[in-house]
Structure formats: structure tokens, C-alpha cells
Image (tube, rainbow, N blue to C red):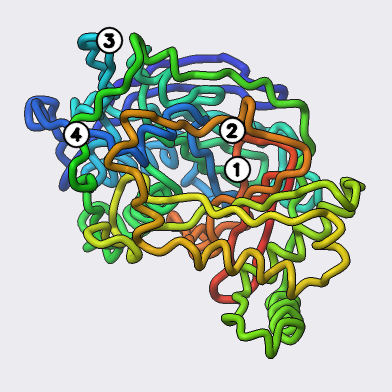
């Protein structure tokens, strides 16, 4: 574990104390690069298309640890358990590699064991209430996240880490954050690693971990070349920089009773239409879509869309629940602003329901085998418009269960990555049956 002292101030009120590199370890012993040398994870079309977006950035706000357990003692404990979690997810301690050949480029994740970045920061003037109590998320929260402003292709070009963590000590709490390249993993894999880390911190070095291990082998459709040659002279050719206009982020809490009420209302409004049952999430997102359309004052004739990410685990054969790569596709519902405001909650929720239901296994796999011939990447530039709404994350992710050993999270927040007008991030509170949504 390499340690470098620093006094850089990343944002007003947040000071970086140190940066270190954490290597994967098993049973307290570091995993050497020699053990991993030669192992390569080839990236799938689902992975490669996400090299053009920002890192996934999520974190939890925790209460203060017991007296005497803060400072370097706290940081050492979290760095050690972070290394042990990397022992399971060791490809994320590697580096992206680019091979240029005959006018094409191939990108892979090499298990070098170089390690992940680990940052210790302090923000003594910021309280838990400053972060969690306000409807509007203060901009300083974005400074709690490392590797800000990077896309996956940047990491490949500069041999930067694909994974980093940051521990920020506040006046009366601790914020634990993680940033992971979207080119190597999706939200399911992100929270799988985060859950593993928190459990290893909570239970100690020698305890047995109940969180299941990840499935590291990538899935490729039949006839797909491995590694995949991208028809570009250099990797930077796929990147389109997008300067996001300033946004203000709001955080809303929906009680279990409110979610149940929305679901009952949506299903009552479409009863007898021969439709499938509207889910709690579809009801909630329909409510948000209608509210956002009204707030934007869209013309009744203007088309508005809602895109949700749909997981392929359990829907595509040979893609197991523990799959540690990208395995999501997009489902988009379309209507005019007048239709979704005039036709009611149930009608709007049914649009979302049908968009998701249309994605059977054949639709999810689609043209993946020939994707490399005409690759399409995820972009904000040229894609975003002021009538769109997009939801990532999932209320099924156990974000609020990340107790690192001294108490459950007070709140969950995300960084500045991919923040644009109309982005909605949903978190579930499983024990309460409630939902929380961050909206830009």
C-alpha cells in the first residue's frame, strides 16, 4: 500500500490529507502483480459502449465512529477492508489496455494488480445535516468523490485506475464514496463491490463473508469476435466531450405509504385494459415524469421520452446474478407532454411497463454479435434534449445496508458524474418499503 501525503484543496471546505494505492489482498496478504500477470478480461459490447461516459460515483453518509476510532485508525481500517474486497474483485485493481492494429483498436482490462486509488480527506466545516437535511444537495458533495471528470477512454489512454475510493471525515460524520469506470462495470456490480467492502469492514479480517463472490468471466454472444476490434485509428476518436450546463440537484423521499398509494392508483386507472400489473417503481417514475413535464412547461404537442436501464441478469442465459461486468440495456417510452399530463398516472405508467416488457432475451442481445462493425456508444453530447428523463440505479440495490461497523447510512448521495437536467437516480429503503429519488 503506497502512501503519499498531500494538502491539496479539491473544493471549498474539503482538504485532501493523503492518497494511497491499495492492492488486492486475500486473508491479509497482498496479491502480487506476478500472481495476476497475463490474465486479461476482454470487454464486451455492453462494456465498450460505456467507455464514453463518466465513472459511476456513489457514496454513503455515515454517523461518526466511536470516540478514538476516527482519523488514521478509521482510514487504515477502511483501506484494509477495501483491499480485501479487491481480493474478490481483483480485475478492478488492474488497468485498461489499448492495442492498435491495422486501423482498429481493441480495449481490454488487464489484471496487473496495480491497485485502486484511496483518498483520505477532511471537511471539518461540513456537518451531516448540511448534506442530508436539505432538499437541495449542496455542490460540495461532489468533492467527496475521486476521479471526477474522467470517462473510461481517458483511463485507458493515461493508465489511470478504473476504481477509486474516498473517505471524507466531516464535523460529525463520515462520507465513504467510490468511483468505478462504467466501461468495466454497471450499477449492479458497483453495489456488489460496495456491499462486500462494507461487510468486510463490519465483520473484521478473519470473519466469513456472506455476500456472494462475483462472477468475473465475461459473456460474449455467439459469433462475436474476442477481443472486439473497434474501427478507429485511436481510442480518443470515440470520445465526445460534453459540457453540462449547471444543474441543481434535489433529493425527495417517498414513504412506503405514498409508494403503495401511487401503485394502487396506477393499477386502478388501467384496470380492465388487459394490461400487466404496474410495479411500484413504474408508478413512481410515471409520477416523476408527469411532474417534470409540468415543471418544464413543455408544449402539449412536444414529444417527451423516459429512458430506464433494464438489467440483463436473469433475463439473458449465461449472464448470472453475480456477473461483474456491464449487463444493462435501455428501454424508452415516448409520448407527447399533453398525453402524459392529460391521460393520467396509470396511462403513463403503462407506457413504461410496455417499454420494459418489450425487452425479451432476443431484444436484449439483438445485434451484439455484429456491434463491432457499426459500434454505437453512450453519449450525452448530441443525445440529450430538454424533454428527456433518464433513470439509472435501482431501488433493489442495497445502498442503505452498507454498515461499515458503526452504524447504517444516514443518507446516500452521488457525485457530479453524468449530471444533466432530467436525470433521476432512485434508491430503495428495503426495510421500510420506501423510495428516495435524486433529481436534476
Q: Is residue 181 above or below residue 278?
A: above
Using the image as rendered, state which of residue 136 and residue 300 is in the foreground: 300
Q: Is residue 253 toward the left or the right of residue 338 in the image?
A: left
Q: Is residue 311 above or below residue 79?
A: below
Q: Is residue 39 toward the left or the right of residue 94 in the image?
A: left
- Name the mark on residue 303: none
Q: Is residue 9 toward the left or the right of residue 20 in the image?
A: right
Q: Is residue 141 above or below residue 245?
A: below
> In front: mark 4 or mark 2?
4
Mark closest to the chain's N terminus, 1 or 3: 3
Tell me the quadrant of the picture where the N terminus can be found.
top left
* Residue, disc 1: 414
* Residue, disc 4: 225
Task: Give how far apart the Cα atoms at labels 4 and 1 are.
Answer: 36 Å
Neighbourhood count class around disc 2 (C-alpha, 10 Å): few under 14, some 14–19, many 20 upward: many
Using the image as rendered, state which of residue 90 and residue 228 is in the foreground: 228
Where is residue 282 drawn, in percent x and y?
A: 63, 68
Give the residue drawn at x 68%, y 71%: 283
* Residue, disc 2: 417
Mark closest to the chain's N terminus, 3 or 4: 3
Using the image as rendered, state which of residue 375 and residue 48 is in the foreground: 375
Q: Are marks 3 and 4 in contact (CB under 8 Å)?
A: no
* Residue, disc 3: 103
Where is residue 200 drawn, in percent x and y?
A: 32, 54
Q: Are marks 2 and 3 in contact (CB under 8 Å)?
A: no
Amino acid at each position: 500500500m503506497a502512501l503519499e501525503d498531500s494538502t491539496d484543496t479539491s473544493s471549498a471546505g474539503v482538504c485532501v490529507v493523503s492518497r494511497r494505492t491499495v492492492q488486492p489482498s486475500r486473508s491479509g496478504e497482498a496479491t502480487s502483480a506476478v500472481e495476476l500477470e497475463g490474465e486479461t478480461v476482454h470487454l464486451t459490447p455492453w462494456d465498450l459502449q460505456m467507455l464514453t461516459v463518466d465513472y459511476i460515483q456513489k457514496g454513503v453518509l455515515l454517523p461518526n465512529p466511536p470516540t478514538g476510532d476516527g482519523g488514521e485508525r478509521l482510514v487504515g481500517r477502511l483501506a484494509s477492508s477495501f483491499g480485501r474486497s479487491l481480493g474478490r474483485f481483483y480485475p478492478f485493481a488492474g488497468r485498461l489496455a489499448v492495442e492498435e492494429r491495422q486501423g482498429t483498436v481493441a480495449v481490454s482490462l488487464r489484471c496487473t494488480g496495480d491497485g485502486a486509488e484511496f483518498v483520505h480527506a477532511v471537511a471539518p466545516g461540513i456537518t451531516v445535516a448540511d448534506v442530508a437535511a436539505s432538499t437541495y444537495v449542496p455542490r460540495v458533495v461532489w468533492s467527496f468523490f475521486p476521479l471526477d471528470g474522467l470517462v473510461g477512454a481517458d483511463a485507458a489512454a493515461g493508465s489511470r485506475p478504473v476504481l477509486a475510493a474516498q473517505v471524507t471525515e466531516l464535523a460529525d460524520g463520515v462520507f465513504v464514496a467510490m468511483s468505478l469506470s462504467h466501461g468495466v462495470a454497471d450499477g449492479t456490480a458497483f453495489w456488489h463491490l460496495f456491499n462486500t467492502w462494507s461487510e468486510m469492514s463490519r465483520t473484521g479480517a478473519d470473519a466469513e463473508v456472506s455476500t456472494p463472490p462475483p462472477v468475473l468471466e465475461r459473456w460474449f454472444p455467439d459469433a462475436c469476435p474476442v477481443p472486439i476490434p473497434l474501427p478507429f485509428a485511436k481510442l480518443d476518436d470515440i470520445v465526445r466531450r460534453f459540457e453540462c450546463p449547471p444543474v441543481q440537484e434535489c433529493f425527495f423521499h417517498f414513504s412506503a405509504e405514498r409508494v403503495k398509494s401511487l401503485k394502487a392508483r396506477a393499477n386502478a386507472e388501467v384496470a380492465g385494459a388487459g394490461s400487466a400489473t404496474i410495479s411500484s417503481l413504474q408508478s413512481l417514475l410515471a409520477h416523476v415524469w408527469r411532474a417534470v413535464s409540468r415543471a418544464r412547461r413543455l408544449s402539449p404537442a412536444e414529444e417527451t421520452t423516459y429512458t430506464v436501464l433494464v438489467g440483463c441478469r436473469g433475463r439473458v442465459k449465461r449472464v448470472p446474478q453475480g456477473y461483474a461486468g456491464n449487463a444493462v440495456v435501455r428501454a424508452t417510452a415516448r409520448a407527447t407532454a399533453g398525453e402524459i399530463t392529460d391521460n393520467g398516472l396509470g396511462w403513463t405508467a403503462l407506457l413504461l411497463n410496455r417499454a420494459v416488457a418489450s425487452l425479451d432475451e432476443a431484444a436484449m442481445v439483438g445485434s451484439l454479435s455484429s456491434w463491432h462493425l457499426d459500434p454505437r456508444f453512450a453519449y450525452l453530447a448530441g443525445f440529450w434534449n430538454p424533454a428527456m428523463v433518464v433513470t439509472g440505479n435501482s431501488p433493489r440495490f442495497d445502498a442503505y445496508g452498507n454498515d461499515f461497523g458503526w452504524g447504517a447510512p444516514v443518507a446516500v448521495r452521488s457525485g457530479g458524474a453524468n449530471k444533466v437536467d432530467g436525470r433521476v437516480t432512485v434508491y430503495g429503503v428495503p426495510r421500510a418499503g420506501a423510495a428516495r429519488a435524486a433529481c436534476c
